[in-house]
Amino acid sequence: MAVASDHIDRSERSGVPPQLIIVAGVALNGFAVLIAESWQAESGPSLLLGISPFELIALGVALVLLRPGLMATAPATIGVAEVLLAAAMLIPSSTAAWSALAGYGAWLALRHDGDGRKGALILVLLALASLWSGVGIRLVGDAVTLAEARLIHALMGLAGLDTPLAGTAIGPPDQHHVVLMPACTSLQVLPKALLGLVALALGLGQVSHLRLALAGGLLALVVVLANSARVAVMTFSLEHFHLAHGAVGSNIFDVVAALSVFAGASLAVRR
């Protein structure tokens, strides 16, 4: 099987390979549900229209890493795989779009080396993270929320905050309490944060696998603790719930996650 080399003089070629246009179009179709939900929100659309910044970072890094290798062969490599991928743009389903992109990313990873293979693998991770947040977590939602509710309750106990726990409901049943939902768990956010970490690290340069694994573990710990603290604050009162669940709590959590991703990517890159 022929493997396309990505070690070419980037200054000799310009333009955008048609494959990347197709990839961007399929990704946009995958984001369509998030964009629609954000646009219809009572508070108005968010700055990124419901799309995680880590997903955008991953997509951007993947396209940049893939471009040189695809420019070396475009348009000769437009074939059945690209036609099938383009068809996914016409299907009004984010699940279909991300599934197609995962398959195409795996196909590119087999055909490229160097930066091209890194970009292709980032595409696969992007698709899998999006499929998890859109479909996967719903399949195991009950188990995930129950486990995380117990974890949050245990952490609150260690902090001296003694509060009742009944299933996924944290707090006194006859007073203010919080019922944890799958969308409010750290496992909803963590895959995309890890995606951002991997993509950013690969985009910055040569990566130490050991350092990347360490950074990933530390990032997971930060995300779980930050999300647990946010949910714990929600249990204090209705006013605290709106504060932590609303824009203030969301922005604080996003800043903590973003700083952790950037710090982890810096740690993972070899110097």
Image (cartoon, helix red, strand yellow):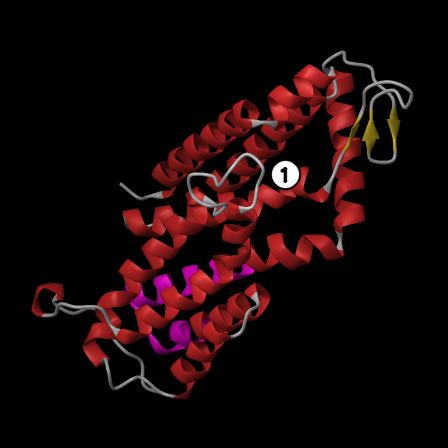
Q: Is residue 253 magenta?
A: no
Residue at the spot x=45%, y=74% of the render?
A: 104
Instruction: Give the dominant element type of the magenta stretch: helix, strand or loop.
Output: helix
Q: Where is residue 176 in the image (x, y as percent from the top left)?
A: 81, 19
**Side of 243 where 81 appears, left or right:** left
Residue at the spot x=76%, y=41% of the render?
A: 145
Q: Which of 155 and 187 is in front in this view?
A: 187
Q: In which quarter of the image is the N terminus?
A: bottom left
Q: Where is residue 200 in the image (x, y as percent from the top left)?
A: 36, 46
Query: Is residue 6 shown to the viewer in this render?
Result: no
Q: Where is residue 259 in the image (x, y as percent from the top left)?
A: 42, 31
The total of numbered circles placed on residues is: 1
In the depicted structure, whether residue 92 falls above or below residue 188: below
Q: Give the quarter of the image for residue 170.
A: top right
Q: Label 1 amino acid?
A: Ser
Outermost residue, left direction? 12
**Side of 189 where 271 appears, left or right:** left
Q: Position of residue 124 (x, y in %)?
A: 48, 64
Tag 1's secondary structure? helix
In the depicted structure, whether residue 165 falls above or below residue 91: above
Identify the residue under disc 1.
186
Residue at the spot x=53%, y=52% of the render?
A: 36
Q: Quadrant of the C terminus?
A: top left
Mark 1 Cα shell of 10 Å, populated few (<14), some (14-19), many (≥20): many
Q: Magenta segment, which residues?
A: 106-128
In the depicted structure, whether residue 268 falls above or below residue 58: above
**Side of 106 where 172 appears, left or right:** right
Q: Is residue 110 magenta?
A: yes
